[in-house]
């Protein structure tokens, strides 16, 4: 039932609005709204109950094991939320003067510095609002760099076929053509193919390392040398930073520009689809292009550096400089962890992934890259099960929901057929991983004895499988007031 | 070990299962020369109570000055229930709802959000959010250029009276794609976009779209009907940039002109999001049905499950990067789901009447503070046209200096307009939301009165007290 269906004319949550309704007399009638918008009219209790109940229809980290590959669904410490929502932080207006912002700016500055250290980059901007916006900023910086050198022939960005969809989309948003590079049979980038593609048109390459197939590209130094020799720059998609935090640094691998997903590695909430934060780090030669604002510190005072102070910047990406509350949460998380804790993140994320992969392999499932170490995630391919049992990766994924496990990422990366990309993260216990293995084994047994059960799963969720074709063909994207045509209030 | 549950026994057993001797061995595919030692510059970890103490002191350090700044971020009351529910773990710690059956809560909520934005804007469809109002406008501009089938132009008319930070954001996001933003001056007397100003630019056209800001950055109300018709007569699309609280009072974009605006976008912050230094907020983007396939971002649709029961799912995903990669409408992936959760609960709790009360109260308070301030010598409205909940004022002394003195008294007196509009110097943009009391407004006026007096009197031998 929609909240609109609970609505009754004349009902209100009266405590929530100002008591008085001053008459508005100075706005010309032609500019006034002619009738009230059709928003729900419900009591406060009805609203609270409705949304509390809706929340209960979700899987979440707080309620379920959520091994969604590439998304790093680890525990979001509650302290980060509570402290980022202290009244002083919530009340600060974005245009408050620096004199009334030193406490807040200290947090941002220290976060910038910590991110520089863990990534090995020369400078960091916290401005991008999510990973994809970090990519946009990063590629825009690559563009600005080549343009400033008068190097106008570089029109292509190389992107491995395993890359996340945002990589090619971001490159195109910056006016580049995308050239795809295949992945070799061992999961590393195909060097021969790279050799053929790289050249005077190459502006740069976008890499994720460990890649989205869950292995660390062993040839990274050779790739960096090759692309640099051709005059291109290296972009690092930091979505998988959780795998190497405190162990290896993108800056040391030779990357010129990177983004981090703080909503992954630094455990800020995913919120059912954001907000995120996608800070970018750069090597010295790209520093002047960083998006604004930045926070500077002269030993006494924190200051904003904006367009005026940074004339070569690629500019501003949101009106007020980024998802500040998320940056605070990441800062708190980083301080809770400290240097030892950061290293522990990658160590135990990697231990959990390798343990889970070993157990699933021992149980007879096929790893996509069985000879390789898993990074913080790995791929199981259900190609054999799909062929022999006619039960595919999607069926397994849906049936896992019935067992109380959120499904791993399915059908990404596209190059591995019938794949489940599994990322357990460091915050899960051995018992939970064992439970997941038991569920996978049980589902395979069901697939052998009662395949319909798996193919029609889930059976215990608020809804069964949804008709996506109908959703796209008979578009129903908003509730319509009865007897009223939308768009003509 | 914070956030890592492993016991020493677990570690031994797990390493044994993997078949390695130590955790370090798990990193043996990484070239040894790349592996680092200690991260010396990162401080040691802290206990929760210690970081708690640090954050308390930092939050306190910034004081909580009395806020008369609006300029795109508004200090509204947020019902207690909004964030208590939004921060429930089931909303807070869920991912984007790709697995629809296990995400019906978030999906239904997004559908309800879309329905509410459609009701507010009077357009047909809404997406499920973009990063913020300014980046949302950039997406709207890119969308309009793609969607305009009648005019193949990469030029877009953007009023100078649009928020300066929006104009800058727009420039940084769309300029790499060859889009040309043509600035429309504002009328020096009214502060609005005059049709004559558009006529003067007509020859440089054709244009793919005209951006119409209601109210504009100065709070001034634009002649949205005339502007919309002007653009449509020239086959340009109309992008409305609107404040969702203002829409409780003002004509919705879907009603503008003869046929309505084509796209509406804006900042959802006034719908239950704390000021929080500028984010996270959420951008919204709505459009007419015919453009839905050009709309970027997540869209939720209602459909049926295997049993014929209604349910919700992400739809039209062929627009998006995870399916279309380099041919997607946008690169956006993670957006602002949690803020949309707050906005939906906020709109539900206020309802249409509540939002109208908020809008009317802000408007009345801004009128009140304007009246008080304009009673001071040399303070007067910059423009003579009607406004909504924001007022540009001329000051008799340099704005930066006056604002600094006010801040020293814990009053944020407004946004300094001279930085972005040197031609208006000295001027400030002032806003008083429903949160400001009569006493607070009085206090602002009397402090400003004293500051102006010291600035405009002949220099005295004694250092002024302020
Ligand atoms: C590998 C990879 N790259 C980029 C992104 C994009 O990040 P965001 O969703 O924060 O925009 C993601 C996550 O969604 C990802 O998994």
Image: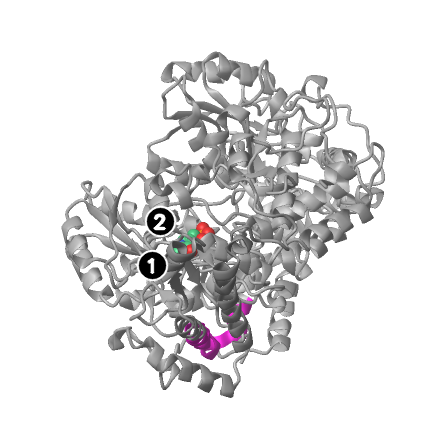
Within-10-Å neighbours for mark 2: few <14, some 14–19, many 20+: many
Q: Residue furthest front?
A: A449
Q: Earlier in the sequence, mark 2 or mark 1?
A: 2
Q: Residue at x 57, y 23 (%)?
A: B192
Residue B63, image x, y percentages? 66, 60
Residue B31 vertical placement versus B155 (above, below): below
Left or right for B268, reference B435: left
Q: Secondary structure at mark 1?
A: loop
Do residues under tags 2 and 1 come within 8 Å of each other at their CB atoms? yes
**Crowd class of label 1 (few under 14; some 14 to 19; many from 20; radius 10 Å):** many
Residue displayed at 57% across by 52% down:
A272
Q: Is residue A342 magenta?
A: yes
Chain ID for label 1? A
Query: In the picture, residue A268 is in which quadrant?
Result: bottom right
Q: Which quarter of the picture shows residue A11?
A: top right
**Mark 1 lies within 8 Å of ligand 1 (Cβ measured):** yes
**Which residue is under mark 2?**
A167
- Residue labelled with disc 1: A208
């Amino acid at each position: 039932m929609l909240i609109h269906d609970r609505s009754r004319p004349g009902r209100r949550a009266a405590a929530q609005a100002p008591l008085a309704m001053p008459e508005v007399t100075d706005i010309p009638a032609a500019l006034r709204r002619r009738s009230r918008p059709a928003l729900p009219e419900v009591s406060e209790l009805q609203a609270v109950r409705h949304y509390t109940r809706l929340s209960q229809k979700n899987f979440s980290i707080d309620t379920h094991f959520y091994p969604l590959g590439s998304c790093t669904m680890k525990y979001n410490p509650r302290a980060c939320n509570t402290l980022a929502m202290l009244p002083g932080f919530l009340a600060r207006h974005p245009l408050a003067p620096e004199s009334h912002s030193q406490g807040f700016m200290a947090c941002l500055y220290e976060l910038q510095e910590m991110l520089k250290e863990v990534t090995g980059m020369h400078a960091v901007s916290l401005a991008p609002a999510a990973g994809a916006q970090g990519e946009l900023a990063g590629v825009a910086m690559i563009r600005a760099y080549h343009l400033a050198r008068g190097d106008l022939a570089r029109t292509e960005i190389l992107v491995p076929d395993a890359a996340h969809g945002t990589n090619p989309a971001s490159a195109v948003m910056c006016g580049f053509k995308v050239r795809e590079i295949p992945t070799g049979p061992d999961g590393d980038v195909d060097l021969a193919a790279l050799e053929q593609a790289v050249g005077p048109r190459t502006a740069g390459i976008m890499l994720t390392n460990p890649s989205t197939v869950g292995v660390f590209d062993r040839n990274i130094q050779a790739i960096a040398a090759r692309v640099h020799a051709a005059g291109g720059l290296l972009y690092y998609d930091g979505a998988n930073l959780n795998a190497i935090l405190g162990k290896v640094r993108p800056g040391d691998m030779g990357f010129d520009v990177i983004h981090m997903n703080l909503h992954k590695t630094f455990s800020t909430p995913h919120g059912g689809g954001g907000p995120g934060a996608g800070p970018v780090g750069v090597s010295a030669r790209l520093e002047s292009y960083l998006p604004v604002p930045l926070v500077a510190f002269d030993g006494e005072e924190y200051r904003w550096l904006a367009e005026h102070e940074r004339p070569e910047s690629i500019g501003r990406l949101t009106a007020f400089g980024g998802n500040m509350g998320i940056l605070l949460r990441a800062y708190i998380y980083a301080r809770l962890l400290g240097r030892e804790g950061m290293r522990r993140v990658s160590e135990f994320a990697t231990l959990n992934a390798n343990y889970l992969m070993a157990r699933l392999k021992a149980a007879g499932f096929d790893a996509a890259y069985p000879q390789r170490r898993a990074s913080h995630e790995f791929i199981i391919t259900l190609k054999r099960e799909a062929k022999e049992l006619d039960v595919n990766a999607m069926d397994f994924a849906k049936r896992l929901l019935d067992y109380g496990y959120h499904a791993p990422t399915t059908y990404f990366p596209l190059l591995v057929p019938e794949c489940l990309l599994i990322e357990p993260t460091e915050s899960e216990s051995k018992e939970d991983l064992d439970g997941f293995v038991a569920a996978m084994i049980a589902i395979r047994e069901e697939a052998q004895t009662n395949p319909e059960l798996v193919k029609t799963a889930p059976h215990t969720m608020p809804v069964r499988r949804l008709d996506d074709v109908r959703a796209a063909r008979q578009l129903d994207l908003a509730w319509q007031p009865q007897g009223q045509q939308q768009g003509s209030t | 070990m914070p956030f890592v549950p492993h016991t020493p026994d677990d570690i031994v057993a797990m390493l044994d299962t993997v078949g390695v001797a130590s955790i370090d061995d798990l990193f043996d595919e990484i070239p040894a020369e790349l592996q680092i030692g200690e991260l010396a510059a990162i401080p040691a970890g802290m206990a929760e109570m210690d970081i708690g103490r640090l954050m308390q002191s930092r939050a306190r350090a910034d004081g909580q000055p009395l806020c008369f700044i609006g300029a795109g971020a508004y200090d509204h009351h947020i019902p207690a229930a909004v964030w208590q529910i939004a921060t429930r773990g089931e909303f807070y710690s869920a991912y984007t709802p790709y697995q629809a059956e296990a995400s019906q809560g978030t999906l239904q909520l997004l559908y309800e959000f879309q329905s509410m934005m459609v009701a507010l804007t009077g357009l047909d469809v809404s997406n499920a959010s973009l990063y913020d109002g300014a980046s949302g406008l950039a997406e709207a501009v890119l969308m309009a250029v793609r969607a305009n089938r009648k005019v193949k132009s990469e030029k877009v008319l953007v009023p100078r009276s649009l928020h300066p930070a929006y104009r800058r954001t727009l420039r940084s996001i769309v300029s790499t794609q060859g889009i040309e933003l043509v600035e429309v001056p504002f009328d020096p007397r009214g502060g609005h976009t005059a049709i004559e100003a558009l006529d003067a630019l007509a020859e440089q056209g054709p244009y793919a779209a005209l951006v119409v800001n209601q109210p504009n950055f100065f709070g001034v109300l634009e002649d949205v009907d005339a502007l919309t018709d002007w653009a449509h007569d020239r086959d340009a699309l109309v992008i409305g940039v609107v404040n969702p609280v203002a829409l409780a009072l003002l004509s919705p974009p879907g009603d503008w002109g003869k046929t309505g605006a084509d796209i509406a976008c804006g900042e959802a912050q006034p719908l239950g999001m704390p000021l929080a230094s500028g984010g996270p907020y959420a951008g919204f983007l709505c459009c007419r049905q015919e453009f839905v396939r050009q709309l970027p971002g997540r869209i939720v649709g209602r459909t049926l499950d295997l049993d014929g029961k209604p349910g919700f799912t992400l739809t039209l995903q062929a627009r998006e990067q995870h399916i279309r990669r380099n041919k997607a409408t946008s690169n956006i992936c993670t957006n602002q789901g949690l803020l949309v959760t707050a906005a939906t609960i906020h709109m539900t709790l206020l309802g249409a009447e509540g939002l109208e009360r908020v809008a009317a109260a802000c408007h009345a308070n801004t009128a009140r503070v304007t009246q008080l301030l304009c009673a001071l010598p040399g303070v007067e409205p910059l423009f003579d046209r009607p406004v909504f909940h924001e007022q540009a004022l001329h000051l008799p002394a340099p704005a930066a200096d006056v604002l600094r003195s006010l801040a020293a008294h814990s009053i944020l007196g407004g946004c300094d307009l001279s930085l972005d509009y040197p031609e208006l110097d000295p001027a400030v943009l002032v806003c008083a939301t429903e949160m400001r009391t009569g006493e607070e407004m009085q206090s602002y006026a009397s402090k400003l009165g004293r500051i102006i007096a010291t600035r405009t009197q002949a220099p005295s031998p004694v250092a002024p007290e302020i």
